[in-house]
Each structure stands twice: as structure tokens, then as C-alpha cells.
Amino acid sequence: MKRNKLLVAGAAALSVLGLASTAVIVLGQEEEATEAAREHVTPLSQLGPAATATDVWSLQCGLGTSRARADVLDLGGVDGRRFIVTLTDSHGRAVSRTGNDGGASSLDILLSSGPGNYLVYVSKTSAGTFENYNSIVHCETSIGGAVAHNIMLVQNQ
């Protein structure tokens, strides 16, 4: 039988890293809470028309993190421009992938650098109009378990 629980994901881990004073609190069934803590879809975002426009998201992964994952969904329709998602860690290591045009996922990219700060860069292959997207990010253990995290937009172009 599934029981409803109040889940506080990693408050101590975030506090130790000085990343946040409060944790993500999720109400609901345990399985749903674990999924919510594991994956974060950013609010609908819009990348500007310039070819050089780049949004930057800061992802802070709590203690117990083995790797960070990132993805981007192109919500601008089929228009010949594709999104590029790049994930970097605090040591300068980076992985990048160019997505498909028109709604398809770019496929997850991952970087195994443990707990700490990661940056997620979202850009596109060419100039055009404003283009909508969602990025999907999360922090996980070496076996894919949920790890508390915090994400915020630090550059909006």
C-alpha cells in the first residue's frame, strides 16, 4: 500500500554546502516525490533572436551526487534552428549536444563530477526569432537515485 508522506529532500546536504537554507518539500506519494526531487523542468523559457543568445542556468547538486544530467526541449516548432545544451562543472569540464529541430529532446547529457555547482548553457545554431524551450536538469547518485538540487537562471538572453 502506498502511503502519502512529506518528503524533505536533502536539507542537511544543502545546508552543509551553503546552497540553501531550506530544502525542496514535496507532498504526495513517495514514488512521485522521488521523481519530483530527481528531475526539474525549468519554466517555459525564451531564447532571443541573436545567433549568440545564450541562457545560463546554475545547478547546485547536494551531497551524494555522482553526476548531473541536462536536456533541452525545442518548443519553437520546425524552423531550421536547433538548440544546443552544454553542461559544465566547476573544474572546467564540459559536455554538449545539439538537439533535433522542433520539439524533440536533445537526449540527456551527463557529467560525473560529484556534488557542487554546474552550469547549463542553452544556445541555438543560428539567428532568427525568439524561440521557446524547456530545459530538464537533475542531480543523481551513481545508480540514478534522486539527489537534492537547486536551479536558477543566471543569464537570460
Image (cartoon, rainbow, N blue to C red):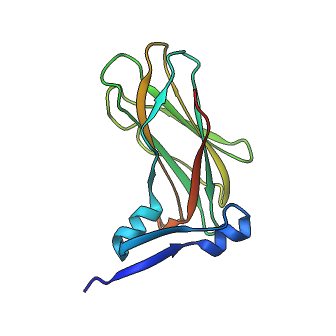
Between 17 and 110, the one lying in front of the other is 17
Displayed quadrant of residue 65: bottom right
Residue farthest along the bottom direction in this orientation? 1
Q: What is the quadrant of the N terminus in the image?
A: bottom left
Residue 31 lies, in percent from the top left, at 35, 72
Q: Which residue is drawn at 74% across and 47% down?
A: 91
Tell whether 75 sits left or right of 93: left
Residue farthest along the left direction in this orientation? 1
Residue 40 lies, in percent from the top left, at 46, 53
Q: Where is 27 relative to 134, above or below?
A: below
Residue 108 lies, in percent from the top left, at 44, 45
Q: Residue at x 37, y 29 (%)?
A: 100
Residue 63 lies, in percent from the top left, at 65, 68
Displayed quadrant of residue 19: bottom right
Displayed quadrant of residue 150: bottom right
User: Looking at the image, how many numbered discs can be counted on the residues?
Assistant: 0
Q: Which residue is drawn at 45% across and 13% down?
A: 128
Q: What is the quadrant of the C terminus in the image?
A: top right
Tell whether 99 sits left or right of 1: right
Q: Residue at x 65, y 67 (%)?
A: 14
Tell whether 13 sits left or right of 98: right
